Image: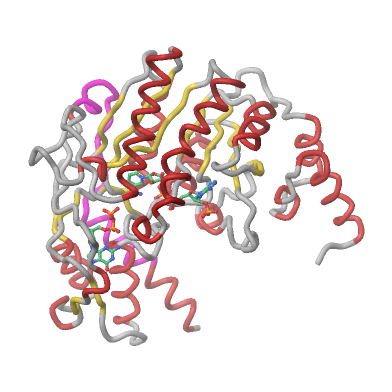
């Protein structure tokens, strides 16, 4: 797989730091030296961001956003046998060569201490998680360990190695669960309804606690569902837009869904990563809710997607109880007033435009697979 000289370079990078992925992902040799000798800043005024979850949807959009702002962007990547495709989302956005990958895992405190010591980040965005709610019933302990304790692990590594950095925690509207108010705000009490949401509540309160206990700049962004062409196929919007593309192009006949009456407040991931950055530019750390303020049922979102390609959802959608959950979150609708006033943030993309972009991207992908 490696040429002789490439193999030597690979070893040069891998041995001192354990960062085998660095070369494998196509980093230049000089990056190997950077990995060996500690990262040298390219200019004194250039800010450094460290992103966990860089290979996910938000990690990719946030990396693109920060690179455009002139940041040096470092992404934590966990060892995987699928390392040849791990940068697929970054590649979709054309930024895979500009991100510097570092080897670490949220369940390994020593790896995060080493990464933070070497990178010396100004801002840390903790986006890594087992993020799929339905899987959290099948893997409750893993979800608690990565999604919950993992955040505490990053916080602890930051406290020890970069106490002056600013920290963002990817909190979730799922924490509201059985929503105690019809429209949720930062003050609405949490009532989590899944192992995922419970892990997120723990991570949220640890973020608040590190702010209050150690005076660290730690912020929790309570983000409502946000989607894009880079959303995982298991999430309902992407499942729908992908199925719409397959049905339109004649490679699928039906779409099986679970609870189509659930309502979500869906926005575009690229708008939401901007909010993450805005939060960390504030002098005082705080918690912010990020949402569009509009809620839509799965059924209506589905109709929207089918209608875009000239089809009727009723002709193709079937309900399959396999996709129902042990406990459901029926309604989420956020009030982003605080983010609007304090950050100057607002959602820019309508659900119609989001679904159109996702269907177009899936049509392109399915056509490419067929050709
Ligand atoms: P994704 O599922 O797309 O990405 C999750 C990321 O976490 C991947 O990069 C994954 O890496 C990484 N990861 C998982 N386990 C570990 C681990 N043990 N060590 C290091 N990295 C790990 O999520 P999104 O981008 O959609 O979401 C980003 C964050 O925001 C998540 O924390 C999510 O829970 C939260 N959130 C998301 C919302 C949404 O609507 N998208 C709403 C509210 C909160 P790998 O590629 O190796 O699997
Ligand atoms: P979540 O809000 O983080 O759980 O995001 P999802 O996209 O996974 O689910 C949003 C809502 O769609 C939930 O209420 C699900 O129960 C509902 N839903 C209905 N059918 C499906 C399905 O087939 N897959 C998924 N993922 N969700 C579905």
| Residue positioned most to the left | 182
Q: Eyeballing the image, is 159 above or below 294? A: above
Q: Eyeballing the image, is 108 above or below 118? A: below
Q: Eyeballing the image, is 256 above or below 284? A: below
Residue nearest the viewer, comparing 97 with 235: 235
Give coordinates of residue 249: x percent, y percent: 34, 83
Quadrant of residue 144 within the rendered picture: top left
Residue nearest the viewer, comparing 121 with 61: 121
Give coordinates of residue 161: x percent, y percent: 61, 21
Q: Residue at x 41, y 30 (%)?
A: 277
- Please tell me whether residue 343 belongs to the stretch shown in magenta: yes
Q: How many marks?
A: 0
Which stretch did the figure color magenta? 338-361
Quadrant of residue 173 within the rendered picture: top left
Using residue 77 as the reference point, say whether residue 269 is left or right of it. Answer: left
The coloring applied to the image is: secondary structure
Residue nearest the viewer, comparing 175 with 338: 175
Q: Residue at x 55, y 52 (%)?
A: 94
Give coordinates of residue 206: x percent, y percent: 39, 28
């Amino acid at each position: 797989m490696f040429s002789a000289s490439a193999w030597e370079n690979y070893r040069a990078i891998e041995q001192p730091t354990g960062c085998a992925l660095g070369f494998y992902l196509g980093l230049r040799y000089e990056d190997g030296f950077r990995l060996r000798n500690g990262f040298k800043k390219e200019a004194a005024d250039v800010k450094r961001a460290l992103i966990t979850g860089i290979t996910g949807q938000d990690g990719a959009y946030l990396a693109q956003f920060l690179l455009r702002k002139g940041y040096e962007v470092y992404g934590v990547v966990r060892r995987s046998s699928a390392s040849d495709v791990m940068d697929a989302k970054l590649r979709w956005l054309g930024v895979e060569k500009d991100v510097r990958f570092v080897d670490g895992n949220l369940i390994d405190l020593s790896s995060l201490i080493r990464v933070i010591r070497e990178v010396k980040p100004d801002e840390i965005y903790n986006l890594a998680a087992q993020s799929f709610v339905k899987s959290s019933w099948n893997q409750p302990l893993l979800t608690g360990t990565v999604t919950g304790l993992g955040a505490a692990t990053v916080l602890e590594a930051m406290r020890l190695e970069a106490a002056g950095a600013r920290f963002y925690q990817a909190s979730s509207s799922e924490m509201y669960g059985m929503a105690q108010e019809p429209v949720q705000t930062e003050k609405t009490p949490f009532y989590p309804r899944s192992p995922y949401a419970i892990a997120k509540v723990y991570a949220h309160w640890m973020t608040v606690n590190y702010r209050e206990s150690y005076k660290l700049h730690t912020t929790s962004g309570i983000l409502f569902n946000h989607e894009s062409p880079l959303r995982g196929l298991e999430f309902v919007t992407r499942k729908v837009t992908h199925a719409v593309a397959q049905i339109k192009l004649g490679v699928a006949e039906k779409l099986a869904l679970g609870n189509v009456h659930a309502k979500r407040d869906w926005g575009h991931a690229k708008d939401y990563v901007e909010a993450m950055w805005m939060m960390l530019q504030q002098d005082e750390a705080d918690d912010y809710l990020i949402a569009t303020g509009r809620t839509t049922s799965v059924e209506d979102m589905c109709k929207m997607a089918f209608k875009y390609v000239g089809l009727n959802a009723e002709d193709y959608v079937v309900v399959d109880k396999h996709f129902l959950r042990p406990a459901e979150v029926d309604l989420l609708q956020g009030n982003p007033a605080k983010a609007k006033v304090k950050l100057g943030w607002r959602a820019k993309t309508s659900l119609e435009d989001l679904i159109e972009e996702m269907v177009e991207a899936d049509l392109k992908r399915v056509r490419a697979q067929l050709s």
